[in-house]
Amino acid sequence: MKNSVRDAWADGQTAINAWLNIGHPFSAEVLAAQDFTSLTIDCQHGPSDYSNVLPMVQAMTHSGKTLMARVPWCDPTWIMKFLDAGAAGIICPMINTPEEAAEFVSYLRYPPLGQRSWGPTRATFAYGGYDKDTANSSVIAFAMIETGTALSNLDAIAATAHLDALYVGPSDLSLGMSNGTLKPGLDREEPEVIAAIKQICEAAHDNGKRAALHCATPDYAARAVEWGYDMVTLATDSVILATGATAAINSFRAKTDKAAATAADTPTASDLY
């Protein structure tokens, strides 16, 4: 069961993740054809549920990329069904204590490492040689650190057995650590938030884990790599669509407005005679 994120990490490379909000197989397939390491379907804040996830994973399987999902909550129903559909990584929001982290991890691992129920209905066909031991060692468990409580329990969460990585959600982290005085948003510049982002990365590495950061721009993602982050989420499908459309129409209007202004300033034959 190949996992391109684990392969990138083994080679000392940063994994580049794409975020899928749109919830359609075709847009997912288009992004999977690009040079990302992994793609994550957002089932927490995005519109996708299992009926979307299954055809999206099917559309992306042959890309060779690691296909992941952010689940709505730490719920075994979502986690196990997405894994059975062929997800090779799960990002779980709002992990605040080591007990919650251990519970989350247990849903991703077959016994004796966890309590995942056997039934990889589609995963068996999607991945050759699928078995419980291979799945246990391949599937990636990301615990999201995004509250003040999680920060206070950071080292204990990071020490959780069989947890692979900490994933930073900057919007909720900013809200949580400031008790709501900071506005939500990505690519934070507040010194205290940057310090927390760096602290999370250090805690992950100190405990033999990886660290991932959700970014809005390539420039900020590059800074995250400098801070030591092992995975950066670099692009969101809905944002790419909106910014691409805006850039195209603004460019068109600038060119046509300029052409119209130039035509208005050009003397005609009647002006010359």
Image (cartoon, rainbow, N blue to C red):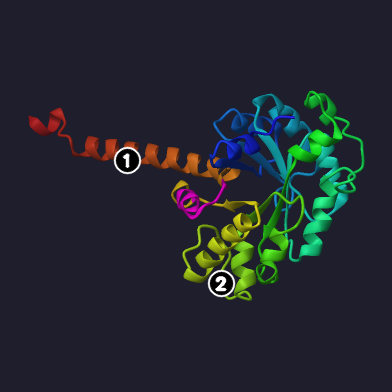
260 relative to 147, above or below: above
Does the magenta segment cover residue 100?
no
Kind of residue at disc 2: Leu
Q: How crowded is mark 1: few (under 14 residues within 10 Å), some or many (20 or more)?
A: few
**Residue 195 as seen in the image, left or right of residue 117:** left
**Residue 205 as seen in the image, left or right of residue 266:** right
Viewer-proximal residue, 80 or 32?
80
Locate the C terminus and report the quarter of the image it occupies: top left
Which residue sits at x=71%, y=41%? 68
252 relative to 198, above or below: above
Q: Which residue in the protein does label 1 denote? A: 257
Q: Is mark 1 on a helix, strand or loop?
A: helix
Q: What element carries label 2?
A: loop
Kind of residue at disc 1: Asp
- Residue 32 picture location, percent across and down: 62, 31
Q: Which residue in the protein does label 2 denote? A: 182
Which residue sits at x=85%, y=47%? 113
Start and end of the magenta stretch?
221-232
**Residue 114 as seen in the image, left or right of residue 271:** right
Residue 100's disc number: none
**Residue 174 as seen in the image, left or right of residue 57:** left
Q: Nearer the viewer, mark 1 or mark 2?
A: 2
- Residue 215 picture location, percent across and down: 54, 52
Locate the N terminus and report the quarter of the image it occupies: top right
- Residue 257 picture location, percent across and down: 32, 40
Q: How far apart are marks 1 and 2 (CA)?
A: 40 Å
68 relative to 34, above or below: below
